Amino acid sequence: MKTIKFFSGQELPVELHKVRIVQKLFLKPIEERFEAIEEGGYNTFLLNTKDIFLDMLTDSGTNAMSDNQVSSMLQADDAYAGSQSFYRMESALQEVFNKKLLLPVHQGRAAENIISQVFIKEGDVIPMNYHFTTTKEHMEINGGKVLEIYTDEALKIKSDFLFKGNIDIQKLRDVIAEYGKDRVAFIRMEASTNLIGGQPFSIQNMREVREIADEHGLMVVLDASLIGENAYFIKQREEEFKDASIKEILHTMTGLSELVYFSSRKVSSTRGGGICTDDNDLFLKMRDLVPLYEGFLTYGGMSVREIEAMAVGLYETTDETVINQSPSFIKFAVEKLDSLGIPVVMPAGALGCHVDAKDFLSHVPQEEYPAGALAAALFIVSGCRGMERGTISSVRDEHGNDILADVELLRLAFPRRVFTLSQTEYLIDRVNWLYQNRELVGGLKFVDEPPVLRFFMGRLAPTSDWPQKLIAKFKEDFGESL
Ligand code: F0G
């Protein structure tokens, strides 16, 4: 992807790839989209892709693979133990992350399970820039408490602070002083911090965290699921690294952490995941859990074909023109939506465009899940599927009350190299229409609420007949069209 200046004066992201395999999409009429969301309990996770036009739920496992990735799958070496495919992936990781030892796992949360079981004991705390849903659940199951120590800028929707993923250094010192270093299991830094809008941290911040960790003998654990994008933002935004290669930046980041874990569903556009380290003692502490939960140490629950594609995908993560595709489209969408007065997380981050549902639907109380309602409403009026990242993705307290999320976001993910600019324009147009008609959208309530990670399987219903009113207005404006 390269942003090119046009004769018209416009600057647009232009693809440095051509599309050679495509998948047919359908844009169903609004009544059918309404039926689909009713059947799915107003939860976009429960939709069937046959009813979806643009699937912007996530970039996880949905990025487009390259020709080199697909062709590498043909040379996969089927073997339970000692597969050549594994050694090729191990070499790729050694080169790209500069860590010697690798434990393969079937996806990112499997790494979280192993790390949490091994390094967290009852009563421990884990300071971090921000939690991720599955990360927090694994840490709590193992008796740990997540402490989010983000900076004051992190949750501001519109900010010009370029590193909203930074850890607040003073808060980190305070946490260690309050709990004592023995109760701090480790410090976790998440690259391109997902739940606050795909926001990066700086190397300078990571160095400061490292310094404090060293003072107290603490371990720094890096969630590298979105490390490529974080490295790209560092190159764009941190003066010291403007001429550095992406690989040099990746090495600097991984070099500041003892443990690096990742979801390959994001970082290398495949499936799977892994944990890397240079420390043999740490490696041995975790090693025996891999055959127990994942599979033998040379496949870790992945197919050998995925492992081959993962190796190639990891090398491609060092190519700026590959990893900047999603951030460039997100920036395009964010700036356009902002110019239309629509509240979006700024600066534009990684993985998706994040609409601020609290502001967009300011008449919907947070107890009625504005981000979930916005996700459902956008699906009805456009066929675009986003993901709720707000209170539905949170939990209840011991009295059964919702713990209201810090931010109510509708995430519209841009998987790498999947959508075109005209599809992005369609999305922007429908979000804008919805914004002009926002007073028609009401809230949601749970009708079936699972106790753990309720956002995945929970079913909800509208608090009034607002979807019917929204559909009537849509038809008035667009006729009986789509
Ligand atoms: N860490 C981060 C920062 C993630 O974004 C994810 C997944 C995981 C860990 C877990 O990895 O899915 O392979 O088990 N994020 C996906 C998303 C699910 O849609 O943002 P996983």
Image: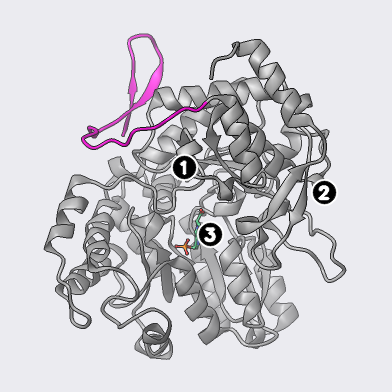
Any mark on residue 205, and which?
Answer: 3
Residue type highlighted by circle 3: Asn
Q: Residue at x 78, y 64 (%)?
A: 396
Asked if residue 15 lies left or right of residue 164, the reply is: left
Where residue 239 appears, as percent x and y from the top left, is 43, 45
Q: Secondary structure at mark 3?
A: helix
**Is residue 305 within the magenta segment?**
no
| Disc 3 residue crowd, few under 14, some 14–19, many 20+, Cα 10 Å | some
Q: Main secondary structure of the magenta part?
A: loop
Any mark on residue 49, and which?
Answer: 1
Residue type highlighted by circle 1: Thr
Q: Residue at x 67, y 31 (%)?
A: 343
Q: Secondary structure at mark 1?
A: helix
Where residue 86 appears, as percent x and y from the top left, is 22, 73
Residue type highlighted by circle 2: Glu
Whether pointer 3 and pointer 1 mark residues with C-beta atoms closer than 8 Å, the reply is no
Whether residue 225 can be seen here: yes
The answer for how far apart the CA atoms under marks 1 and 2 are is 29 Å
Q: Residue at x 64, y 60 (%)?
A: 168
Where residue 184 appears, as percent x and y from the top left, is 63, 81
Where residue 23 appears, as percent x and y from the top left, is 32, 36
Q: Secondary structure at mark 2?
A: helix
Query: Which is nearer the N-term, disc 3 or disc 1?
Result: 1
Any mark on residue 367, and which?
Answer: 2
Query: Which is nearer the N-term, disc 1 or disc 2?
Result: 1
| Residue span colored magenta | 1-28
Question: In which quadrant of the rendered image does the N terminus lie?
Answer: top left
